[in-house]
């Protein structure tokens, strides 16, 4: 079971957020429902992940091709 922090008064939005009241740990049994996800946010997160991974993969592939060319070529 997961839990969440609860503040007895409103949270103060600063960095980090603060609570001038009493903090308590309350059980949170909210089930995850994929239908609540915003499709635009999901696509944006996936595109951001691809923007990080793809250039690294492309550089690694390019370096492998240069090494393959310099070593004479026909290794796996």
Image: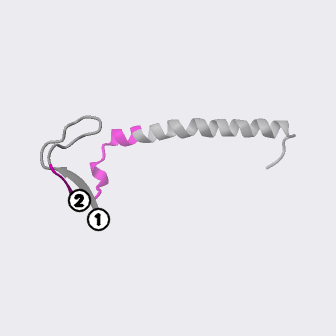
For disc 2, the marked residue is 28
Q: Residue at x 14, y 42 (%)?
A: 10
Residue situated in front as seen by the camera: 11 or 52:
11
Determine the image quadrant of residue 46. top left
Cα separation between marks 2 and 1: 7 Å
* Percent coordinates x, y for residue 71 in the rendering: 85, 40
* Percent coordinates x, y for residue 55 in the rendering: 58, 35
Q: Is residue 8 left or right of residue 27?
A: left
Whether the magenta-drawn stretch holds residue 2 is answered as: no
Residue situated in front as seen by the camera: 47 or 19:
19
Q: Secondary structure at mark 2?
A: strand
Q: Residue at x 84, y 36 (%)?
A: 70
Q: Residue at x 73, y 40 (%)?
A: 64
Q: CB of mark 2 within 8 Å of CB of mark 1?
A: yes
Mark closer to the chain start, 2 or 1: 1
Give the residue furthest to the bottom: 1
Query: Where's the N terminus, which quadrant?
Result: bottom left
For disc 1, the marked residue is 1
Determine the image quadrant of residue 32. bottom left
* Percent coordinates x, y for residue 35 in the rendering: 29, 51
Q: Which residues are magenta?
A: 22-44
Q: Secondary structure at mark 1?
A: loop
Q: Is residue 29 above or below residue 55?
A: below
- Badge 1 crowding class, 10 Å Cα cut-off, few under 14, some 14 to 19, many 20 or more, is few
Q: Is residue 1 left or right of residue 49?
A: left
Q: Is residue 27 left or right of residue 72?
A: left
Q: Residue at x 29, y 35 (%)?
A: 15
Give the residue furthest to the right: 72
């Amino acid at each position: 079971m997961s839990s969440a922090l609860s503040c007895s008064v409103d949270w103060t939005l600063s960095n980090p957020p603060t609570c001038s009241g009493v903090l308590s740990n309350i059980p949170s049994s909210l089930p995850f429902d994929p239908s609540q996800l915003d499709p635009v946010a999901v696509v944006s997160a996936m595109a951001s992940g691809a923007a990080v991974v793809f250039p690294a993969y492309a550089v690694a592939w390019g370096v492998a091709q240069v090494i393959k060319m310099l070593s004479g070529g026909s290794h796996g």
